[in-house]
Amino acid sequence: MDIILKQDVENLGLEFDTVSVKPGYARNFLLPKGYALLATPKNKAALAETLESRKEEEAKLVADATAKIEQLKKTELTIATKVGSGNKLFGSINNANLSEELAKAGVTIDRKYIKIPGNNIKSTGKYSAQVRLHRDVEYTYEFDVVSDAPPAPAAPKPEPKKVEAAAEETSEEA
C-alpha cells in the first residue's frame, strides 16, 4: 500500500516521501496517528503543489544537508568499545551510538537519519551506515569498530632450563 508521509517516521522515511508499506501497518498505525495519507491521485497532486510552493525552503534544506554531508566526509571515526573473545562486542553498536560518536567528533546528526544495515553491529571491523538527511541528499558513511582495551604486551618467554645441568645432576646421583 502506497502512502505519503506527513512527518518523519524513523526507519521508514522523511516528510513528504511516498513509501510502500504493508496494509496493516498503514491502517493500524500510520493513518490513525496522522503520520501519513493514502497515496491517492488527489493526495499526490496536493503533494506536488506543496512541494512546488516549498521550493525555496527545500533548496535551503538541501543546502544545509549537503553542508553536513561535506563535513561528514572530512570526519574519520573509530568507535572503541569493549570486546570479548572472537572480536565479539559486549552489547552492540546502533544508530544512536553512532550519532553520539559523531557528535563528539563535531558533526551533529540525529539518529533517525542514520540507518545501519542489520540495525546493530556485534563485532569489530569496518562498517558503513546510510545517512539520509533529505530525500535528495544521501551518503554512505564508513567507520571502524575496534577494541578499547590496550594491546596486551607480549609476555616474556621463560628461559628454557639447561638440559646439560639436569643431566649432570642425574649422573652424580647414580
Image: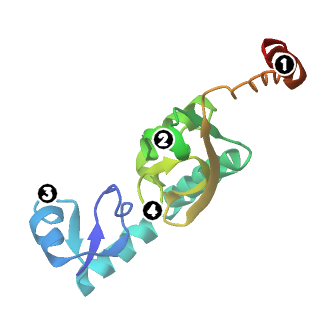
Pick the quarter of the image with the C terminus: top right
> Would you place residue 71 above or below residue 56 in this image?
above
Give the foreground label among 1 and 4: 1
Q: Could you say which disc has been placed on residue 54 in the image?
A: 4
Alpha carbon separation for disc pair 1 and 3? 93 Å
Task: Choose between 66 and 1: the one closer to the eye.
Answer: 1
Taking 166 as reference, is 21 above or below it? below
Q: Position of residue 94 (x, y in %)?
A: 44, 46
Gap in angstroms between the C-alphas marked 2 and 3: 37 Å
Mark sitting earlier along the chain (1/3): 3
- The answer to whether one can see residue 157 in this image is yes
Which one is earlier in the sequence, the residue at label 4 or at label 2?
Answer: 4
Marker disc for residue 89: 2
**Percent of width and height locating residue 78:** 65, 39
State if disc 3 and disc 2 touch (CB < 8 Å).
no
How far is mark 1 from mark 4, CA to CA? 99 Å
Which of pointers 2 and 3 indicates the residue nearer the eye? 2
**How many C-alpha atoms fall within 10 Å of the one at disc 2: few (<14), some, or many (≥20)?**
some
**Secondary element at tag 4:** loop
Q: Is residue 42 left or right of residue 157?
A: left
Kindly identify which residue carries mark 3: 33
Q: Are marks 4 and 2 in contact (CB under 8 Å)?
A: no
The first of marks 2 and 3 along the sequence is 3
Circles 1, 2 touching at the beta carbon (< 8 Å): no
Secondary structure under the numbered disc 1 in the rendered image: helix
